[in-house]
Amino acid sequence: MYKKFMLAIIMTVAVTTVFAQKSEKKKPYDKTLLESRKNHKQRIQEGIKDGDLSKKEAKAITDQEKKIKQAMYKAKQSGGVIDENERAQIKQMQLDLDKMIEEKKKNDELRKKPKS
């Protein structure tokens, strides 16, 4: 009787552990799409505030951010859920935007140099 009880407990723990691990393994894009958008907005605002981005650069970045927002909206409208292919495309757009923000922020050194 004791062996059956212990076996039941061990099985329960094993099954629970497997399900807990599966639920903890969230896909890398679960929340990252929205978190990335918030991060981009914050970086744009900081760049403008710090003078690292000109108005023209901020506009170009904001326009690209709007395209990402539209892609997310369109993907959700197609079936209520963004599928893996759409997420991959949106994530790539976000990565490209990250690079764009960095490039534009770094070129401020060129802008701030006194003209000779």
Image (cartoon, rainbow, N blue to C red):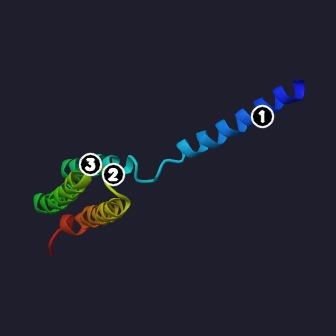
> Along the horizontal axis of the image, is 29 left or right of 93?
right
Give neighbour class at mark 1: few <14, some 14-19, many 20+ (Cα, 10 Å). Answer: few
Q: Residue 21, position in %: x, y? A: 60, 44
Q: What element carries label 3?
A: loop
The amino acid type of the residue labelled 2 equals Leu
* Residue, disc 2: 33
Residue positioned most to the top? 1
- Can you tell which of label 1 and label 2 is closer to the viewer? 1
The amino acid type of the residue labelled 1 equals Ile
* Residue, disc 3: 80
Evaluate if marks 1 and 2 touch, with contact meaning CB atoms under 8 Å apart: no
Query: Residue, x 22% and y 55% (percent of image)?
Result: 78
The amino acid type of the residue labelled 3 equals Gly
- Position of residue 60 relative to residue 81, above or below, is below
Quadrant housing the N terminus: top right
- Position of residue 82 relative to residue 2, above or below, is below
Query: Residue, x 34% and y 59% (percent of image)?
Result: 87
In this view of the protein, which residue sits in the foreground, 40 or 75? 75
Mark number, residue 45: none
Mark number, residue 10: 1
Evaluate if marks 3 and 1 touch, with contact meaning CB atoms under 8 Å apart: no
Q: What element carries label 2?
A: helix
Q: Earlier in the sequence, mark 1 or mark 2?
A: 1
In this view of the protein, which residue sits in the foreground, 105 or 63? 63
Quadrant housing the C terminus: bottom left
Q: Distance between the residues labelled 3 and 1?
A: 40 Å
In this view of the protein, which residue sits in the foreground, 25 or 83? 83
- Position of residue 8 relative to residue 33, above or below, is above
Q: Residue 91, position in %: x, y? A: 34, 60
In this view of the protein, which residue sits in the foreground, 7 or 74? 7
